[in-house]
Amino acid sequence: MPAVEQIQFLFVLRDSSRRLRRWVELLASSSEPNSDSRSSVSPVPTPDQMSGVLSELLRAGEFLRSRPGESNPDLEDELADYRQQLERLRDQLPLIHRALLNERACLEHECERVQAAAEWARASGRTLSR
C-alpha cells in the first residue's frame, strides 16, 4: 500500500499534468493557422499563454525534485503522462519560434514604414515653410 506521501505526490503530479495539458492544448490551438485568414502565418501565442506554461513548468520542476524514493505503478503512469505533455510542448516549440520570428519581421517592417512616413512629414514641413 502506497504511503500517504506518495499518494499526495501522485495527486499533485496529476493536477500539474492536467494544467500542463491544458496549456499545451491552448498553445497548439493558437499555433494553428487561422483558416479565415488569407495568411498562412501561425498566430503568436499570447504572453498569458507563455507565462502560464513557464509558470507550470517551474512549479512542476520544484515539485518533482521532492519525488518520494519509492515508486508504484500509479506514480509511474502519472510520470509517463507528464512526460508525454512535455514532449507535446517540445513539438510545439518550433511552431512558436517561427510565429515569433514572423511577428518580429512584421514589427520591423512596420517600424520602417513609420520611420519613412516621419521622414516624409519632416521633409514636407520644410518644403511648405519655405
Image: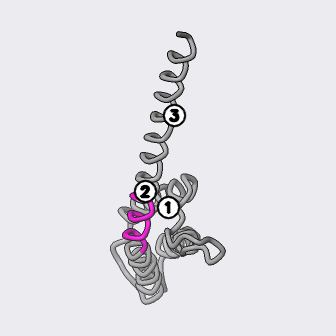
Check disc 1 and give the amino acid type.
Val
Is residue 98 highlighted in magenta?
A: yes
Numbered circle sitting on residue 58 = 2
Residue stretch rendered in magenta on the structure: 92-101
Indicate the colouring scheme. Answer: one colour
Look at mark 1 in the image and give the residue it sits on.
53
Q: Pick whichever, 34 or 129, lies toward us.
A: 129
> Marks 3 and 1: in contact by CB < 8 Å?
no
Task: Decide which of 12, 8 is in the foreground and name it.
Answer: 12
Which comes before the other along the chain, label 3 or label 2? 2
| Label located before the other in sequence (1 or 3) | 1
Outermost residue to the right: 36
Q: Amino acid at mark 3?
A: Ala
| Residue 117, numbered circle | 3
Asked where in the image residue 69 lies, by quadrant, the reply is bottom left
Residue density around tag 1, few if under 14, some if 14–19, many if 20 or more, within 10 Å:
many
Q: Residue 82: horizontal and vertical position, in percent? A: 45, 77
Q: Is residue 123 above or below residue 61?
A: above
Q: Nearer the viewer, mark 2 or mark 1?
A: 1
Predominant SS along the magenta part: helix
Q: Is residue 116 magenta?
A: no
User: In percent of the image, x 44 and y 48: which residue is there?
Assistant: 109
Q: Amino acid at mark 2?
A: Leu
